[in-house]
Amino acid sequence: MIEVTIDGKKIEVEKGTTALEAAEALGIEIPTLCYHPGLPADGNCRLCQVEVIDRGRKSLAISCMYPIRGPVEIFTDTEDVRRARKFVIQLLIARSPQSPVLQKLAEEYGVDVPDERFVQKGEVDLCIRCGRCVRACAELGNECIDFVSRGWEKEVNTPFNEPSKTCIGCGSCAEVCPTGAIVVTEKDGTRTIWDRTFRLVACDACGTPFATEEQLEAAKPEFEQTDTRVLCPRCRKIAEARTIVLLDGAQGGHV
Ligand code: SF4
Ligand code: SF4
Ligand code: FES
């Protein structure tokens, strides 16, 4: 265990804990955009910067990527930190002035929101290029979406802007998106995402369409191990709870 000080508060953490995790454990909030606790960090937004003093040397560090390896002192809200975050917000909001997430940050850090009439023509762009969707899809082993183009043109898309053949329509990318930039529509037993429409399968218990055929196919081993019926998450929970009650009852009967 290593003792670190964050904004004057001391905490002992395991070696390798990130500065962001340590701050969270102390209840100190650091703004993040690309970080998601369920995904590998990749430090692409740089919003979570903090000041670290390590053996007398002061530097800015990306807190979600900074593993604590020694007794450092960390400051999460200094003038330098705020200036660095302000710069990040200025760059992001110049491209997506309509994003409520960025507008909130801009207000907090005193960044002027550009007049979108002069910045953006055409569609509303809510994407803040955090890459969570790309990492979520990659974690599933699908890799159907990625960043394409560079600089101002950079965006998340499917290869060649065509509906992806390997996409299973699971919606995980949309679930982790912090801005609602990925549109998922469900209508008449179908789900459309990334310009591809999937047929939804209904739950064997309640009849609600809840998952795509491709999604269930990908999860098949799990279903075969637990229950032969196709159940939505809610009905699965109920079924599992019933099994536990029945087992408990059976065990109680033998006592
Ligand atoms: S819906 Fe498609 S693109 Fe999105 S995470 Fe699932 S497989 Fe990937
Ligand atoms: S679509 Fe959403 S999750 Fe993906 S990069 Fe844009 S804002 Fe992030
Ligand atoms: S949240 Fe740490 S770099 Fe984006």
Image (cartoon, rainbow, N blue to C red):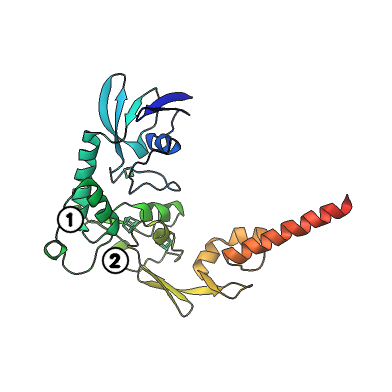
Q: Residue at x 25, y 55 (%)?
A: 103
Q: Residue at x 63, y 63 (%)?
A: 236
Q: Residue at x 63, y 61 (%)?
A: 237
Which class describes the residues within 10 Å of circle 2: few (<14), some (14-19), or many (20+)? Answer: few
Secondary element at image label 1: loop
Q: Earlier in the sequence, mark 1 or mark 2?
A: 1
Q: Is mark 1 within 8 Å of ligand 2?
A: no
Residue 60 spot, x, y in % from top left: 26, 32
Which class describes the residues within 10 Å of circle 1: few (<14), some (14-19), or many (20+)? Answer: some
Q: Quadrant of ligand 3?
A: top left
Residue 241 spot, x, y in % from top left: 68, 59
Secondary element at image label 2: helix
Q: Residue 31 falls in which quadrant of the image?
A: top left
Instruction: For marks 1 and 2, give the CA distance.
Output: 30 Å
Residue that label 2 marks: 161
Report whether 200 appears left or right of 193: right
Report whether 24 appears left or right of 108: right
The number of numbered badges drawn on the structure is 2
Residue that label 1 marks: 113
Q: Is mark 2 within 8 Å of ligand 1?
A: no
Residue 24 spot, x, y in % from top left: 42, 39
Q: Residue most toward the top?
A: 55
Residue 63 spot, x, y in % from top left: 34, 37
Residue type, numbered disc 2: Asn
